[in-house]
Amino acid sequence: MLIKEKTPILSSEITDKAIFINRRKIIKAAAGISIASLLPGSVNAQEKKYAHIPAGPYSASLKVTDYEDAANYTNYYEFSTNKKDSTVLAKNLKTIPWNVTVEGEAEKTGVFNLLKFPNNYLW
């Protein structure tokens, strides 16, 4: 039967007596700080800190892009050079499973599943 011996506790692992005695004060202070962070004045603290910096041409004051425009914008020219038409034209494109065929004078030829490609064939 294995009987483990107690290892002595290091002094660095023991909570300091002053902290232990004042633990309720520390918890109250932490709660007070967290409640104070919910007050409206604390929200503007960061804004005031950087208020002296002039707004640049790409600042957040610009209108946020509509979801439809952002979701349907593409740089793929396989279907159209129009950045909005390619989304509509590619709706029937089947991407899974997507296989790549390697032929000719290659060290390793065959049909490879693109989803497994980065894990097994690169590097």
Image: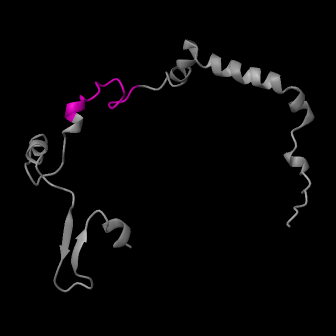
Residue at 26 percent across and 29 percent down: it is 65
Name the spot of residue 33 as percent of width and height, x first: 68, 21
Name the spot of residue 57 as percent of width and height, x first: 32, 30
| Side of 60 relative to 65 (left or right) | right
Residue at 19 percent across and 40 percent down: it is 73
**Quarter location, residue 67:** top left
Position of the C terminus by quadrant = bottom left
Residue at 70 percent across and 21 percent down: it is 31
Q: Which residues are magenta?
A: 55-69
In front: 11, or 94? Answer: 94
Magenta run includes residue 65: yes
Q: Please, is residue 57 above or below residue 114 in the view?
A: above
Position of the N terminus by quadrant = bottom right
Magenta run includes residue 116: no
Q: Please, is residue 41 above or below residue 70 in the view?
A: above
| Side of 92 relative to 105 (left or right) | left
Name the spot of residue 12 as percent of width and height, x first: 87, 48
In front: 49, or 101? Answer: 101
Q: Please, is residue 25 above or below residue 115 in the view?
A: above
**Quarter location, residue 58:** top left
**Quarter location, residue 60:** top left
Name the spot of residue 2 as percent of width and height, x first: 85, 66
Residue lying furthest front: 1
